[in-house]
Image: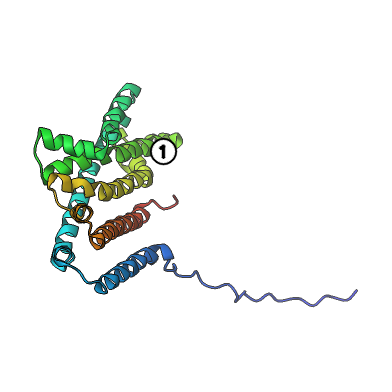
Amino acid sequence: MTAQPEVTRRPSTSSNPPAAPRLSLRRFGTPLAVVVVLAVLFLWLSTLTLDSIEQRTLNSGYLIDRTWEHLVLTVVSSALVALLAIPAGIAAYRVKSKAVRAFVIGLGNIGQATPAVGVVILLAIVWQTGFYTALISLVAYCFLPVLRNTLTGLEQVDHATREAARGMGMTPRQVLWRIELPLASPVILAGLRTALVFSVGVATIATFINAGGLGDMIVNGLKLQRYPVIVVGAVLVASIAVLIDWAAGLVEDLVRPRGL
């Protein structure tokens, strides 16, 4: 019986080192698409002969002012929603009472069940017109998604994980801050992302109570039958909504706990 020659196995050289994370289309495709759309929009505007009314609206100073007002309304209202709705969701979760949860969610439902225009006009009638009235209206309208997602995210944390944390000697407050909130953060941030996009859309009606924003362009364009003004206002609002949703998605990915 002849001996078989021993085969020496060399270390495999075909296995490549871990590749660096690729620049995904999701990270850069969205802003690039928005830039292209805006470039095409303003290129189209440059081919038009604008009358005096359109020139007073479609100029850099007016566009920057209205866009800034829209962004301020959106960001400030979303920040207030986060400061109010997340603690309310945590409190309702800690109470462990179905009646309390139903009451809190019912309050959140009031703002969103009522048409946004109705909330804005009603507050303007009983209080005043302007920025702060629009801000309160946006907070009331966007409160529910963040509240509901906070409750849902905390309730979905695995019971065994909580028990393991308590077995390690953590207090209920430590379990909340170190275990439950980090694990629930993707769901909570998804609610904030929804609230941001809601705010961008609803902020357009702030013009009805003299609170500014890009809604001025859209409403004035409709009243005066100036279609370039309508198109520019609508495209700018849509672009802001898309960019904010994209930025919120990046933040959501960055703060997501590893392994989720």
- The quarter of the picture where residue 105 lies is top left
Q: How many marks?
A: 1
> What residue did someone put label 1 on?
157
Query: From this viewpoint, is residue 90 visible?
Result: no
Tell me where residue 243 appears, x and y as whole percent: 31, 59
Between 171 and 73, the one lying in front of the other is 73
Query: Residue drawn 20% across and 55% down?
Result: 214
| Left or right of residue 1: residue 14 | left
Between 118 and 219, the one lying in front of the other is 219
Query: From this viewpoint, is residue 1 visible?
Result: yes
Q: Residue furthest top?
A: 99
| Left or right of residue 39: residue 155 | right
Q: Residues within 10 Å of mark 1 (few under 14, many from 20)?
A: some
| Left or right of residue 152: residue 196 | left
Tell me where residue 70 appears, x and y as whole percent: 19, 54
Q: Amino acid at mark 1?
A: Val
Tell me where residue 51 appears, x and y as whole percent: 17, 67
